[in-house]
Image (cartoon, helix red, strand yellow):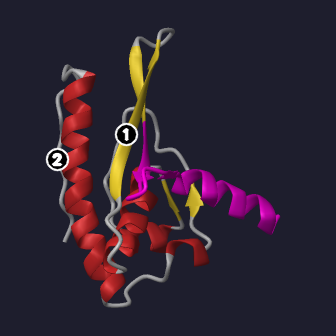
Amino acid sequence: MEIGLTLPDELPDVTRVELARGYLEALTRTDRYLVRNGWVPPLYSTRVLYRLEPRGIEQFVDALTCYRRGWGDCAHPSAWRIAEYLEQGIEASPLFHARFMPRENRYDVHCVIRLPDGSQEDPSRRMRELEKRRK
């Protein structure tokens, strides 16, 4: 089953981030099921690559889709990794960093993980480091 939606381009960036938070929560619920039932291995044991989606496209794909296609942007591995933490009883949550890009007159949003002690984990950065080590 594939689920899709389209948002108007005119939505304010603040609204886009708020909606993205909701989509990521739903994605994390799906990923928890996949992790719990062994449909996907632990994220950092895979060869899944961090890759940006084409400009103007944002797909929220589950861990199994990410694993099968071999790549994901910041939201995909973050949801996957949060699901792993939650399944271990660790209350991790998504954290969105937004920075304004004046040249493009838009915000760039990056998703990381907030851990219970207040520290942050960036699965995208970790995936890039793992990829460099393999080369």
Q: Height in image: 5 above or below 29?
A: above
The outermost residue toward the right is 135
Between the C-alphas of marks 2 and 1, the distance is 21 Å
Q: Height in image: 36 above or below 98?
A: below
Residue 113: within the magenta?
Answer: yes
Image point (39%, 22%), residue name: 107
In front here: 86 or 108? 86
- Left or right of 131? Residue 88 is left
Q: Which residues are magenta?
A: 110-135
Report which quarter residue 15 is drawn in. Answer: top left
- Left or right of 99? Residue 126 is right
Q: Earlier in the sequence, mark 2 or mark 1?
A: 2
Could you tell me which quadrant the N terminus lies in?
bottom left
The outermost residue toward the bottom is 37
Q: Height in image: 88 above or below 16?
A: below
Q: Secondary structure at mark 2?
A: loop
Q: Secondary structure at mark 1?
A: strand
Tell me the residue that label 1 is attached to. 96
Image point (17%, 47%), residue name: 5
Q: Amino acid at mark 2?
A: Leu
**Relative image position of residue 83 (x, y in whole percent):** 34, 70
Nearest to viewer (mark 2 / mark 1)? 1
**Relative image position of residue 31 (x, y in whole percent):** 31, 72
Report which quarter residue 92 is drawn in. Answer: bottom left
- How crowded is the residue under tag 1: few (<14 C-alpha within 10 Å), some, or many (20+)? some
- How crowded is the residue under tag 2: few (<14 C-alpha within 10 Å), some, or many (20+)? few
Tell me the residue that label 2 is attached to. 5
In front here: 113 or 65? 113
Q: Amino acid at mark 1?
A: Phe
Residue 116: within the magenta?
Answer: yes
**Label 2 close to label 1 by CB (< 8 Å):** no
